[in-house]
Image (cartoon, rainbow, N blue to C red):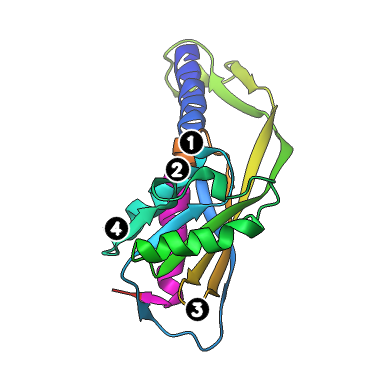
């Protein structure tokens, strides 16, 4: 019976580990410009407004792939825009002198819609997970009377502390011709295990939210 108890304990730990292997992205809130109706866009660019080219391109690609899977023509900003044109001063905004150059490139590429996302915050919190007591009967295969008064074994899994990482991004959609902000959302990704894991969760969630907003159509 001790072996059974140990097996149950191992299964519990394994299931907890597997459940923590992929991040979850949630939408905290969205805004849509009043009076905005669904419009067709010939080509949408996805731009990460920060300097880490590897992370930026992976997140962009996730959004592009999700848009493409839903029938939209999309391109990653890291494929058409020099990294030097973006947020070189790390103020989470496009550099002031980059605006005209970016608009020129987008027009040359036939792009009429733009998704831009920025990192707003990373927060960590620590919580305590209490331990568990569970019992198994003593060694031996007894009948009903044999169990009467038999000893029970007490097993205890000690408690432990868990640190949770929450990553917050703001994602905006712009009409390139009018340069107007039509939609904005803030997303929260919990415990990304890697940038690849983060991207696979972020892209589909944000694109689904954009589609539900009703500002773009095929």
Residue 147, position as x, y percentages in the image: 51, 20
**Residue ID for mark 2:** 57
Cα separation, mark 4 vs mark 3, equals: 24 Å
Determine whether label 2 and label 1 are within 8 Å by CB: yes
Neighbours of disc 4 within 10 Å: few (<14), some (14-19), many (20+): few
Q: Residue 91 carries which label?
A: none
Residue 213 in sight: yes
Residue 34, position as x, y percentages in the image: 56, 86
Cα separation, mark 2 vs mark 1, equals: 5 Å
Write the residue at 46% across / 71% down.
176
Determine whether label 4 and label 1 are within 8 Å by CB: no
Of badges 4 and 1, nearer the viewer stands: 1
Of badges 1 and 3, nearer the viewer stands: 3
**Residue ID for mark 4:** 68
Cα separation, mark 2 vs mark 3, equals: 26 Å
Residue 22 in sight: no
Residue 57, position as x, y percentages in the image: 45, 43
**Residue ID for mark 3:** 178
Q: Which of marks 2 and 4 is nearer the N terminus?
A: 2
Neighbours of disc 1 within 10 Å: few (<14), some (14-19), many (20+): few
Neighbours of disc 3 within 10 Å: few (<14), some (14-19), many (20+): few
Q: What stretch is highlighted in magenta?
A: 200-216
Nearer-the-camera pick, 199 or 103? 103
Q: Quadrant of the C terminus?
A: bottom left
Determine whether label 2 and label 4 are within 8 Å by CB: no
Q: Residue 54 carries which label?
A: 1
Q: Is mark 3 on a helix, strand or loop?
A: loop
Nearer-the-camera pick, 189 or 173? 173
Cα separation, mark 2 vs mark 4, equals: 16 Å
């Amino acid at each position: 019976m001790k072996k059974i108890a140990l097996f149950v304990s191992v299964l519990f730990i394994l299931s907890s580990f597997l459940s923590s292997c992929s991040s979850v992205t949630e939408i905290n809130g969205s805004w849509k410009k009043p009076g905005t109706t669904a419009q067709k866009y010939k080509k949408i660019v996805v731009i990460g407004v920060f300097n880490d080219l590897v992370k930026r391109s992976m997140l962009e690609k996730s959004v592009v792939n999700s848009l493409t899977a839903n029938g939209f023509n999309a391109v990653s900003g890291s494929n058409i825009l020099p990294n030097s044109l973006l947020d070189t001063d790390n103020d989470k905004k496009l550099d002031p002198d980059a605006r005209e150059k970016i608009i020129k490139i987008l027009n040359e590429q036939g792009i009429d819609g733009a998704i831009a996302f920025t990192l707003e915050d990373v927060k960590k919190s620590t919580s305590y997970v209490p331990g568990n007591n569970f019992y198994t009967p003593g060694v031996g295969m007894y009948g009903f009377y044999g169990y009467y008064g038999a000893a029970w074994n007490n097993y205890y899994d000690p408690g432990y502390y868990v640190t949770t990482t929450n990553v917050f991004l703001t994602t905006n959609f712009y009409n390139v011709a009018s340069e107007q902000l039509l939609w904005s959302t803030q997303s929260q990704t919990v415990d990304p295990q890697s940038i690849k894991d983060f991207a696979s969760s972020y892209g589909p969630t944000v694109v689904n939210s954009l589609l539900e907003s009703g500002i773009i159509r095929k």
